[in-house]
Image (spheres, grey):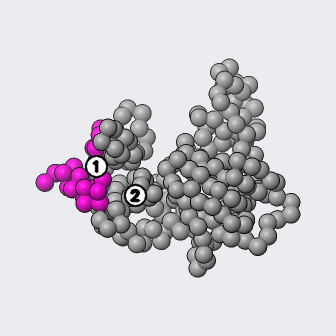
């Protein structure tokens, strides 16, 4: 059985379709995992550079999750793939100790929420707090984004303190600081045409009320909750990820 056939069989066990594609000429990642959609619904699309062979470490059919590993010489890159709120997702997981679905899920849990009650929506964790800092700024209908072109989560109410102000566009989804933005505008005549938006990166963030996302069930936060992002950004093989709002 070929590697492709074996992978398709594992993905089928968790209820997903897999399409194996050749890497395109502009691909720089060792492996690219995307979720696509056709008339039959969502499917996984995987593209690997030459010599990169994925293998599945564990499949949990009842949970609709699996852990996949990609070897690149002595390096081992691991990913958690599965279904959340009716949609397929893929997350790079940090840590050398990941060997199955349980340890992969644990590796993504922010250290700040361990042992505490929390509400989760996708990659975001919300922990109730008694008070918010008095100097935090207040916003309504404010987006949360992990950068890199992710779909934002929209918070009904949000308070923010600290962080770095950055300029964000489709060409710079994780944001660039003011000095870099000014240099870019001064040297590239077409840069100012990009759809720029001022956002704040890695701030202390609190949310209250409804949090909406097109791929997840709406959650309601009764009272202020501190917002934490999962630990995917600590995986060496993750695409560059920022915490933007």
Q: x and y percent of residue 113 in the render?
A: 61, 72
In this picture, residue 218 sits left or right of residue 187: left
Q: Is residue 103 above or below residue 45?
A: below
Q: Which mark is residue 83?
A: 2
Query: Disc 2 to disc 1, how far (Cα)?
Result: 12 Å
Neighbor class of circle 2 (other Cα within 10 Å; few <14, some 14-19, many 20+) is some
Neighbor class of circle 1 (other Cα within 10 Å; few <14, some 14-19, many 20+) is some
Q: Which residue is the site of mark 1?
A: 17
Q: x and y percent of residue 180 in the render?
A: 71, 37
**Which residue is depicted at the point 37% across and 41% down?**
37
In this picture, residue 167 sits left or right of residue 57: right
Image-quadrant location for residue 111: bottom right
Residue ranking furthest to the left: 1
Closer to the camera, 184 or 169?
A: 169
Magenta residues, start to end: 1-22
On whether residue 92 falls in the magenta region, the answer is no
Residue ranking furthest to the bottom: 115
Q: Which mark is residue 207?
A: none
Q: Is residue 179 above or below residue 162?
A: above
Q: Is residue 238 above or below residue 38?
A: below
Q: Earlier in the sequence, mark 2 or mark 1?
A: 1
Q: x and y percent of residue 230 in the render?
A: 55, 62
């Amino acid at each position: 059985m070929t590697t492709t056939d074996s992978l398709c069989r594992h993905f089928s066990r968790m209820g997903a379709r897999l399409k194996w594609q050749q890497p395109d000429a502009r691909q720089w990642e060792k492996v690219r995992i995307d979720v696509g959609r056709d008339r039959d619904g969502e499917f996984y699309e995987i593209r690997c550079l030459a010599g990169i062979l994925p293998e599945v470490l564990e499949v949990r059919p009842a949970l609709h999750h699996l852990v996949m590993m990609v070897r690149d010489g002595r390096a081992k890159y691991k990913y958690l793939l599965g279904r959340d709120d009716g949609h397929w997702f893929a997350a790079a997981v940090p840590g050398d100790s990941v060997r199955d679905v349980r340890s992969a899920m644990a590796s993504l849990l922010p250290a700040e929420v361990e042992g505490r009650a929390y509400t989760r929506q996708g990659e975001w964790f919300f922990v109730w707090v008694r008070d918010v800092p008095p100097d935090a700024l207040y916003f309504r209908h404010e987006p949360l984004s992990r950068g890199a072109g992710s779909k934002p989560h929209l918070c009904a109410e949000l308070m923010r303190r600290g962080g770095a102000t950055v300029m964000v566009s489709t060409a710079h989804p994780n944001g660039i600081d003011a000095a870099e933005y000014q240099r870019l505008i001064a040297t590239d005549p077409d840069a100012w045409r990009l759809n720029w938006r001022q956002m704040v990166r890695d701030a202390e963030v609190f949310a209250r009320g409804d949090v909406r996302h097109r791929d997840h069930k709406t959650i309601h936060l009764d009272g202020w909750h501190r917002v934490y992002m999962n630990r995917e950004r600590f995986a060496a093989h993750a695409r560059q990820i920022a915490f933007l709002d």
